[in-house]
């Protein structure tokens, strides 16, 4: 059955799909062709210009459909920015330089995702574009692993951006596998292909995000209502326990096999030889952040005073102090938990897909201010209600 969206909803969907797809495709293209990365800044500028009409249409639609929320977001943002300028004049240049990203990427994605109501149509379009993104990722993977093409951001034997751009497509394909559709062979192939590429070339954070996404999608599909699902869960738990005690041996076998075929994997190498750690140097950075927090525990150091914490919880306390930071942290956790209460199937799937990215990205990477996936996830959550009025039984 062909799904047709309302005219206004179509604008929101086009903006979100454009935002998700074009940045990933651009990255894979410029990293696949030797010497093309020197034009990356020009490519980003072109994408930003192309994105403007999609953004304006989406915000205009959101204003018409959810006027109060849209006004509240911009009003609250204006108050925050004004307060930051007043309290931390030293941070004004940095905040001002990041405002276009905050308004265009963060707020735009938040408002658009919050105003979306055609979840089924958006989900099916996301399934289609995820296949396109995976195909472009294959091009970069082949160029890097077999032809030695190295872009300026690929100074190590792994590529963090490569892996994270594949999180949404990989989890989306897994969500399709968990659906009740009969034709799943292509989805399984694409999911395996994307996951293998992330493991061999991507970062540990991307692998963790995919694992979380798969767990959320499987839970949302099954709710452990039947014996088969329970059996699968038990089987997976047994496999995970076995892997826990013998992961080094398995990793070494896989790493040696790939190495024989000219493919390196930083993740498998670290797992095989016991060099893998959770922090990857983040603990050193966060120890410095804790010192900065101790200097201004109540009002913080201001937005963008330091963005090296690689953890949103540390960051909000550093920026705004303990009282406001604690409130923001509780709100974020509360919004993340809403996935357990959403009734619409396609909205649950979308929340699972984007939440898997948002959790890992916000807890392990740089600031979420000026990014997109975290705010899309937050927009879905903030449009969900957990207290639903039940119909009275007569």
Image: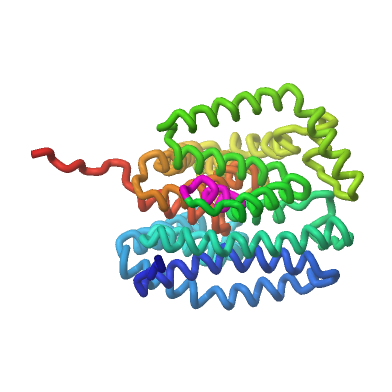
Of residues 234 and 317, which is closer to you in this image? Answer: 234
Residue 167 against residue 219 in the figure, above or below: below
- Residue 145 position, x and y percent, is 84, 55
Q: In which quarter of the image is residue 111?
A: bottom left
Extreme residue in the front direction:
182
Which scheme is used to colour this image of the protein? rainbow
Residue 134 against residue 223 in the figure, above or below: below
Q: In which quarter of the image is residue 33?
A: bottom right
Image quadrant containing the N terminus: bottom left
Instruction: Please indicate, yes or no, whether residue 314 appears anywhere in the rendered image.
Output: yes
Instruction: Please indicate, yes or no, whether residue 301 appears anywhere in the rendered image.
Output: no
- Residue 379 position, x and y percent, is 43, 54
Instruction: State the count of labels.
Output: 0
Q: Which residue is drawn at 57% across and 77% down?
A: 50
Residue 331 against residue 111 in the figure, above or below: above
Of residues 216 and 40, which is closer to you in this image? Answer: 216
Image quadrant containing the C terminus: top left
Q: Which residue is drawn at 46% across and 37% down?
A: 326
Q: Residue at x 84, y 54 (%)?
A: 155
Residue 112 against residue 219 in the figure, above or below: below
| Magenta-drawn stretch, dominant element (helix, strand or loop) | helix
Q: Quadrant of residue 286?
A: top right
- Residue 96 position, x and y percent, is 57, 64
What range of the chain is rendered magenta? 170-180
Of residues 174 and 347, which is closer to you in this image? Answer: 174
- Residue 242 position, x and y percent, is 69, 23
Of residues 321 and 262, which is closer to you in this image? Answer: 262
> Would you say 176 lies left or right of 393 here?
right
């Amino acid at each position: 059955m062909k799904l047709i969206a309302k005219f206004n909803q179509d604008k929101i969907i086009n903006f979100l799909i454009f935002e998700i797809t074009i940045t990933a495709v651009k990255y894979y293209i410029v990293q696949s062709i030797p010497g093309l990365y020197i034009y990356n800044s020009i490519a980003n500028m072109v994408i930003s210009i192309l994105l403007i009409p999609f953004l304006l249409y989406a915000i205009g639609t959101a204003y018409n459909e959810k006027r109060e929320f849209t006004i509240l977001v911009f009003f609250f943002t204006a108050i925050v920015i004004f307060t930051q300028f007043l309290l931390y004049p030293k941070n004004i240049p940095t905040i001002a330089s990041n405002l276009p990203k905050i308004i265009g990427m963060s707020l735009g994605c938040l408002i658009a995702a919050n105003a979306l109501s055609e979840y089924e149509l958006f989900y099916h379009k996301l399934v289609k574009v995820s296949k396109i993104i995976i195909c472009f990722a294959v091009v970069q993977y082949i160029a890097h692993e077999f032809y030695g093409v190295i872009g300026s951001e690929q100074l190590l034997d792994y590529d963090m951006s490569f892996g994270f751009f594949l999180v949404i497509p990989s989890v989306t394909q897994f969500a399709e596998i968990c659906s009740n559709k009969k034709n799943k062979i292509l989805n399984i192939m694409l999911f395996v292909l994307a996951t293998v590429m992330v493991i061999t070339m991507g970062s540990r954070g991307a692998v963790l995000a995919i694992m979380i996404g798969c767990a959320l999608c499987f839970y949302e599909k099954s709710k452990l209502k039947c014996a088969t699902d329970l059996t699968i869960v038990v089987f997976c738990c047994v496999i995970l326990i076995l892997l826990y005690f013998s992961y080094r041996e398995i990793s070494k076998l896989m790493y040696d096999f790939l190495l024989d075929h000219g493919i390196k994997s930083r993740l498998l190498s670290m797992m095989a030889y016991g060099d893998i750690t959770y922090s990857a140097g983040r603990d050193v950075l966060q120890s410095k952040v804790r010192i900065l927090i101790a200097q201004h525990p109540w009002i913080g150091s201001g937005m963008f005073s330091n963005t090296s914490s690689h953890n949103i919880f540390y960051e909000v306390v550093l920026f705004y102090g303990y009282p406001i930071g604690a409130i923001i942290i509780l709100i974020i956790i509360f919004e993340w938990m809403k996935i357990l209460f959403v009734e619409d199937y396609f909205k649950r799937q979308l929340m699972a897909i984007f939440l898997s990215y948002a959790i890992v990205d916000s807890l392990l990477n740089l600031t979420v201010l000026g990014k997109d996936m975290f705010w899309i996830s937050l927009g879905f959550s903030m449009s969900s209600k957990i207290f639903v009025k039940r119909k009275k039984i007569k």
